[in-house]
Image (cartoon, helix red, strand yellow):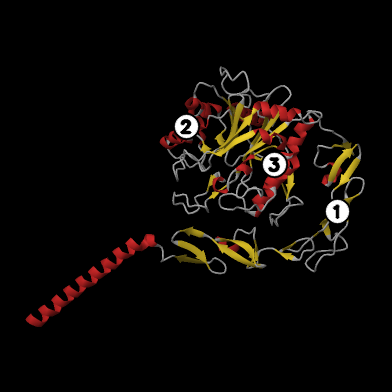
């Protein structure tokens, strides 16, 4: 029995050793010579490379590339895009966790006068096996580190309409690292790839808790500097919209993912400077026609959040769309996002800040978002300044409002879970549970079968109804429950086919008439 346990243990150790050997959080090539000095203008970006995998090596069944030729073409296109961007620090999303594969198929193709070092961090995504990585022309101060932190969802503030069980989640695809503009200007770089599907309630709620993981992890990192200021950059595929940005199709977030990270860490989205018509980074080919149908298929879900005090040093913000052929997924279904950071200006802005004042409230640092029960600010040792609606030494007390008939008060359960927020029956929300949220044909918005699985349950003029899916320019679902498939006969693209069909039947009728007439004539003549 002991030998069997030892054998099993050896197998697991070997598996994890081989897995970790594939990644390179400390860099891939030993002979790379990086820049000795941070350039005066530092270009930083993020790029979701859309399954940058080797088909033969990975054996990943989710991957769209099925042949060696498709893989080689994809690597070549991504490499050309990276060369055209001329970026110094580039975050990579959706890459294979193999430094040999990415190094030989990508880095070797981006060779130029400036060497680039490849880093790939740990991932715990067992489904897709995707990793986040980094290409850098400048030295990093630390490896790409993984934060193993899990939090429950939904969050108390959640606006995702998730009505399932409380669960835990972590952040399976991310890393945190650091570089310095000079000895007194450290910059923390946190890469994220959050849970997909922006408007799905369960994914939305999970993503909000992943955002809290990001916040907690960064605050823990900041606390290590013991009051010294540190710049922060959070970048990657957030799979969500920013409420401060009107993107190309006017997307609005159901969640508070981006806003929570921005507000809790005092960051600004560099993409907020883009005009509406340029504010998109992702293409979802919703009708699979290989054509970018504007604006409904374009949205902004890749973001770069930067410490607000550094924004005056930010310029030349771009979504790199110019080099993509329309409808060509062999590049990616995302466009890279970049910005320029003026080194000297950023250093001066950073130096003008006063040191952080760090206190301890009831054994928790003032940098910990859970200090003062998460409902206030630790302004002095054991001194909390409470948010509106909360009181008590640790901001843990609050009073409940009068709930409507749709609330759930009972002797064993308080009538509210937060100040001004009642516990509501399914289908209702709001401070006093008087607001009804979508419940279509008895099913909640989070049910996979709502609207027959062919639409989204929404509220319009205080009424729940199904917003049915459009398949393409010729077909869409309709009916009160999206149960009927309609075809658009007014679509002009069908007219040539309809004309051909009409001519075919006219000719067929003519031939039938001629043949029938001939038979009748012969019968009458010859009896």
Q: Residue at x 59, y 65 (%)?
A: 466
Residue at disc 1, secondary structure:
loop
Distance, label 2 to label 1, CA atoms, is 55 Å
Q: Is 363 above or below relative to 118?
A: below
Residue at disc 2, secondary structure:
helix
Quarter holding the N terminus is top right
Q: Residue at x 89, y 43 (%)?
A: 384
Task: Kindly indicate the quadrant of the structure image that contains residue 177.
Answer: top right
The tag earlier along the polypeptide, 3 or 1, is: 3
The tag earlier along the polypeptide, 3 or 2, is: 2
Q: Residues within 10 Å of mark 3 (few under 14, many from 20)?
A: many
- Provide the residue designation for mark 1: 389
Looking at the image, residue 328 sits to the left or right of residue 197; the answer is: left
- Provide the residue designation for mark 2: 80
Q: Position of residue 272 (x, y in %)?
A: 63, 44
Q: Is 382 above or below relative to 403?
A: above
Q: Position of residue 149 (x, y in %)?
A: 73, 38
| CB contact under 8 Å: marks 3 and 2 | no
The tag earlier along the polypeptide, 2 or 1, is: 2
Looking at the image, residue 415 sits to the left or right of residue 83; the answer is: right
Q: Residues within 10 Å of mark 1 (few under 14, many from 20)?
A: some
- Provide the residue designation for mark 3: 170
Q: Position of residue 79 (x, y in %)?
A: 49, 31
């Amino acid at each position: 029995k002991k030998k069997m346990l030892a054998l099993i243990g050896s197998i697991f150790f070997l598996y994890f050793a081989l897995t970790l050997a594939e990644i390179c959080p400390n860099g891939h090539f030993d002979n790379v010579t990086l820049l000795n000095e941070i350039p005066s203008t530092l270009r930083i970006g993020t790029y979701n490379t859309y399954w940058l995998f080797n088909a033969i090596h990975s054996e990943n069944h989710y991957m769209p590339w099925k042949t060696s030729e498709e893989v080689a073409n994809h690597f070549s296109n991504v490499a050309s895009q990276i060369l055209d961007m001329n970026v110094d620090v580039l975050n990579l999303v959706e890459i294979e966790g193999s430094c040999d594969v990415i190094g030989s198929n990508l880095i070797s193709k981006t060779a130029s006068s400036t060497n680039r070092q490849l880093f790939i961090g740990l991932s715990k995504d067992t489904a897709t096996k995707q990793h986040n990585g980094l290409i850098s022309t400048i030295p990093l101060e630390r490896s790409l580190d993984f934060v193993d932190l899990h939090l429950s969802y939904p969050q108390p503030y959640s606006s995702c309409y998730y009505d399932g069980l409380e669960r835990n989640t972590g952040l399976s695809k991310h890393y945190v690292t650091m570089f310095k503009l000079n000895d007194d200007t450290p910059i923390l770089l946190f890469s994220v790839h959050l849970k997909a599907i922006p408007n799905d309630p369960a994914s939305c709620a999970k993503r909000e808790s992943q955002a809290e993981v990001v916040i907690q992890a960064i605050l823990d990192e900041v606390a290590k500097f013991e009051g010294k200021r540190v710049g922060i950059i959070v970048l990657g595929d957030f799979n969500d919209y920013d409420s401060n940005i009107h993107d190309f199709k006017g997307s609005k977030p159901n969640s508070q993912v981006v806003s929570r990270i921005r507000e809790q860490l005092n960051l600004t989205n560099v993409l907020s400077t883009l005009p509406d018509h340029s504010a998109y980074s992702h293409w979802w080919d919703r009708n699979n026609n290989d054509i970018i149908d504007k604006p409904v298929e374009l949205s902004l879900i890749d973001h770069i959040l930067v410490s607000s005090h550094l924004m005056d040093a930010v310029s030349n913000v771009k979504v790199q769309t110019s080099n993509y052929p329309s409808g060509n997924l062999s590049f990616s279904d995302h466009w890279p996002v970049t910005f320029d950071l003026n080194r000297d200006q950023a250093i001066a802005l950073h130096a003008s800040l006063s040191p952080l004042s760090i206190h301890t409230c009831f054994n928790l640092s003032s940098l910990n978002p859970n200090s003062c029960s998460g409902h206030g600010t630790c302004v002095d040792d054991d001194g909390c300044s409470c948010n509106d609606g909360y009181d008590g030494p640790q901001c843990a007390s609050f009073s409940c409002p009068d709930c409507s008939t749709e609330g759930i008060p009972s002797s064993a359960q308080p009538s509210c879970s937060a100040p001004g927020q009642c516990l509501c029956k399914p289908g209702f929300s709001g401070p006093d549970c008087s607001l009804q949220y979508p419940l279509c044909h008895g099913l909640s918005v989070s049910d996979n079968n709502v609207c027959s699985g062919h639409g989204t349950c929404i509220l319009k003029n205080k009424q729940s109804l199904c917003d049915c899916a459009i398949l393409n320019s010729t077909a869409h679902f309709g009916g009160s429950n999206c149960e009927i498939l309609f075809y658009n006969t007014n679509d002009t693209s069908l007219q040539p086919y309809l004309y051909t069909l009409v001519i075919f039947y006219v000719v067929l009728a003519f031939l039938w008439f001629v043949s029938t007439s001939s038979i009748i004539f012969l019968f009458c003549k010859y009896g």
